[in-house]
Image (tube, rainbow, N blue to C red):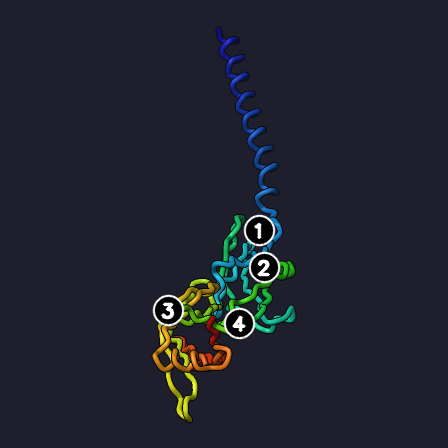
Amino acid sequence: MENVARSAERGTAARRARIASLAACAVLLTVPAAASAAATTATTAPTDPSLVTDTYALLSGIVNPGGVATAYWFQWGRTTAYGQATPVTQAGNGTADVPVDVSLDTLKPGKTYHYRLWAKPTGDPSAGDVVGVDQSFTTAPALAVSIVGRAAHVSTTGKALVKLKAVGPPDGTAAGVLKLTAKLNGQVRSFGVVSYKLAAGATKTIQVSLTAAGRGALSAAKGHSLPVSATAKTSGLKRPLVQKLTLTAS
């Protein structure tokens, strides 16, 4: 019985030694993997068109610190020389992707801008900076209206059909007043006024009811063709649109 007990004890000790040996091997295998940090990465994301207006854009990208304390910023400007940069921000020292973004709200309408994401592994002096690829976007034109064509037909009911087109930010709306005037006997006379409202990017035919003076002048004009001045005053815009227009009637 004593021999059996000693044998069992030796077997238990051997198993314990083997388990300890395996555990030590596991530590040796896993420690180097945990200690070695992956390379820091910086990916510049393209802009979302729905987040670009005439003066605003959202720059975005992804930084992966790779286990090293990392800071990042965006370079941006009108060319690939950039020239401007956003504030330096910390991305941490994790190993997961970190979505980053920054707003620009002092841009010029109708201009193309370039940008790229720049990451600096501050926790590893021997590591070099990481730069994302160049991306670009174009801001929307400033809100404005224009008159399509140089002539406006007048219907039998005395309404001038003036086609307006609005440009500007995707969510912009042009609203204002369209007025037709002309000189009669040396005096500027109103031939009709109407309010308008149309979304940026839209084209709309505006019906301007002619005054009695306007209908009379058109009827008396040679060939029923009468030159007038069309003025569109859009709310929020300092300068009104003024354009020569010819009224025609069948």
Residue at image location 48% in from the left, 6% down from the top = 1
Residue 66 badge: 1
Q: Quadrant of residue 214?
A: bottom left
- Dot 4 or dot 1: first in sequence order is 1
- Dot 3 or dot 4: first in sequence order is 4
* Distance from the alpha carbon under mark 3 to that under mark 4: 21 Å
Residue 157 badge: 3
Q: Which residue is mark 4?
A: 149
Q: Which residue is mark 2?
A: 121
* Distance from the alpha carbon under mark 2 to that under mark 3: 74 Å
Give the class, few, some or many, for how many residues have Cα within 10 Å of label 4's Cα (few <14, many ≥20).
Answer: few
Give the class, few, some or many, for how many residues have Cα within 10 Å of label 3's Cα (few <14, many ≥20).
Answer: few
Q: Looking at the image, do the residues carrying marks 1 and 2 touch, with CB atoms under 8 Å apart?
A: yes
Could you tell me residue 145's position as x and y percent? 46, 72
Q: Amino acid at mark 3?
A: Thr
Which residue lies most toward the bottom here? Answer: 186
Q: Amino acid at mark 2?
A: Pro
Q: Quadrant of residue 25?
A: top right
- Mark 1 falls on what kind of element? loop
- Dot 1 or dot 2: first in sequence order is 1
Could you tell me residue 151's position as x and y percent? 51, 74
Q: Amino acid at mark 4?
A: Gly
Could you tell me residue 7's position as x and y percent? 54, 12
- Whether residue 60 is visible here, answered yes or no, is yes
- Whether residue 146 is visible here, answered yes or no, is no
